[in-house]
């Protein structure tokens, strides 16, 4: 049976979310992995509001529990940081002892990405981490690897899973 990979990311908010998820799952299959996309879950039509949110949460948590690893899109979303839901999913996977492979296109460490006029301080006056990492240390120290894009990440995660 192919390793099951939870496909975490803000991709579910794209206008072509279903098609993009199918593409991610095809990438996984081409490398001997089985992609689990959050939108694979079927939401009953009678659920709305908080009930719908609770169901989506429970279904996604169940997918993370049953997966073998997580592939996480940690590109910036609605600002300079990754999607908060994706960060939660990464944290949950790590807590469950599941490997996480991240992908994002940002280059350089956090200080370079912020490009502040005052070294080490962002535009709101907050200190920017100075550990030479491309993401917050709690994410960057939790993944087993990272790549610049989804294609490379799936390829590298597949190789990693074979070595396990």
Image (cartoon, rainbow, N blue to C red):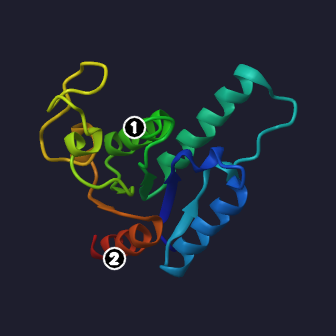
Q: Is mark 2 on a helix, strand or loop?
A: helix
Of 107 and 89, the residue lying toward us: 107
Left or right of 130? Residue 33 is: right
Q: Is residue 54 left or right of residue 63?
A: right
Residue drawn at (73%, 23%), measured in percent from left and top? 51
Q: In this view, does 45 lie above or below 16?
A: above
Residue reaching furthest to the right: 46
122 and 15: which is toward the camera: 122
The answer to whether 74 is drawn above or below residue 45 in the figure is: below
Residue under the point 73% across and 29% down: 52
- Disc 2 from disc 1: Cα separation: 30 Å
- The image position of residue 91, as x and y in percent, is 36, 38
Q: Name the residue under label 2.
A: 159
How many numbered callouts? 2
Q: Name the residue under label 1.
A: 80
Residue 51 in the image: above or below residue 68? above
**Residue 37, horizontal then vertical, whole percent:** 61, 55
> Which image quarter: residue 99?
bottom left
The x and y percentages for residue 83 are 47, 38
Mark 2 or mark 1: whose residue is earlier in sequence? 1
Dot 1: what SS? loop
For marks 2 and 1, give the one nearer the viewer: 1
User: How far across and down, in percent of the image, does residue 127 sit?
Assistant: 19, 25
Say few, some or many: other residues with alpha carbon within 10 Å of mark 2 (under 14 / 14 to 19 / 20 or more): few
Identify whether 2 is placed above or below 114: below
> What label sits on residue 162 in the rendered view?
none
Residue displayed at 49% across by 47% down: 64
């Amino acid at each position: 049976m192919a390793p099951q990979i939870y496909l975490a990311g803000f991709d579910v908010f794209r206008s072509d979310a279903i098609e993009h998820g199918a593409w991610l799952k095809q990438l996984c299959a081409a490398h001997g992995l089985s992609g689990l996309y959050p939108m694979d879950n079927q939401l009953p039509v009678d659920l709305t509001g908080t009930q719908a949110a609770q169901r989506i949460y429970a279904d996604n948590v169940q997918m993370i529990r049953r997966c073998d690893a997580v592939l996480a899109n940690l590109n910036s979303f609605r600002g300079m940081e990754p999607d908060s839901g994706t960060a939660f999913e990464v944290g949950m996977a790590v807590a469950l002892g599941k490997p996480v492979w991240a992908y994002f296109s940002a280059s350089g460490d956090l200080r370079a990405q912020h490009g502040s006029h005052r070294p080490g301080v962002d535009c709101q006056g907050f200190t920017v981490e100075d550990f030479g990492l491309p993401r917050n240390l709690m994410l960057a120290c939790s993944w087993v690897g990272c790549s610049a894009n989804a294609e490379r990440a799936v390829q590298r995660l597949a190789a990693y899973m074979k070595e396990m």
